[in-house]
Amino acid sequence: MVRVSRFCSFFFLVAYGISLGVCMGCLSSIASFTVLRHFGRPDFLIRPDWEIFHYQSMMVSGGFVGILYGGLLCIMTSRPRTHIMWLISLILTIAEASVVYFLADYLALKFRIVVFTLLGHPVVFVLSLVTVAYLGRVSSNKAVSKDMLSEDQQA
């Protein structure tokens, strides 16, 4: 088994958080523009000439939030024998985010209340952390049981 230094692990988690944050910013923008087109493009949430700026600002702000997300992941995985299934957590986070962002934007434009759009981001952040914590716990239990089995077989 290859041991990875603490610095490399921290760097990977922060890079993972930043890339996931950029992906969430892009997904949020796609959801916003899709719902805007569904409602006939009202000039309520995003100005007509600001689409590119909206994409860029959401991706940059998602990257900055991803730094915090990566730091929290580093704290969550600092326990010994804690392993996270990264690919499954990535797929589940994207699925959760797409549902939350589309629903939040749809409700915001249907009822003309911007708060729904603003609440989508913290909800996705917390749901993603809960998903990673659950997957980490399950993986940790499996790792402990495999280690216990190998110790029993050695004795």
Image (cartoon, rainbow, N blue to C red):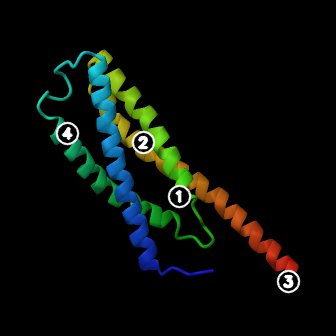
- According to the picture, the residue beneath numbered tag 3 turns out to be 154
Q: Looking at the picture, how far across and down is residue 84, in whole percent?
A: 57, 61
Mark 4 against mark 2, which lies toward the viewer? Answer: 4
Residue under the point 82% across and 72% down: 149
Residue located beneath label 1 in the image: 86
Name the image quarter holding the N terminus.
bottom right
Residue 132: x percent and y percent? 53, 54
Q: Nearer the viewer, residue 120 or 58?
A: 58
In three-dimensional space, the C-alpha distance between marks 1 and 2, rounded to whole angstroms, equals: 17 Å
Q: Is residue 104 visible?
A: yes
Residue under pointer 4: 54
Q: Is residue 152 above or below residue 101?
A: below
Q: Callout 3, which amino acid? A: Gln
Other-residue count near label 4 (Cα within 10 Å), few / some / many at <14 / 14–19 / ≥20? some
Q: CB atoms at circles 1 and 3 under 8 Å apart?
A: no
Residue at 31% across / 44% down in the picture? 25
Q: Secondary structure at mark 4?
A: helix
The amino acid marked with disc number 4 is His
Mark 3 is surrounded, within 10 Å at the Cα level, by few (under 14), some (14 to 19) or many (20 or more) other residues, namely few
Q: Are marks 1 and 4 in contact (CB under 8 Å)?
A: no
The type of residue carrying mark 1 is Trp
* Structural crowding at the residue carrying mark 1, measured as other residues with C-alpha within 10 Å and reported as few (<14), some (14–19) or many (≥20): few
Q: CA distance from mark 2 to mark 3?
A: 45 Å
Q: Is residue 115 visible?
A: no
**Relative vertical location of residue 22 with respect to residue 36 in this rendering, above or below:** below
Circle 2 SS class: helix
- Residue 116: image quadrant is top left
The part of the image, by quadrant, that contains residue 68 is bottom left
Residue 78 as seen in the image, left or right of residue 66 = right
As measured in the structure, the alpha-carbon distance from the residue carrying label 4 to the one carrying label 2 is 19 Å
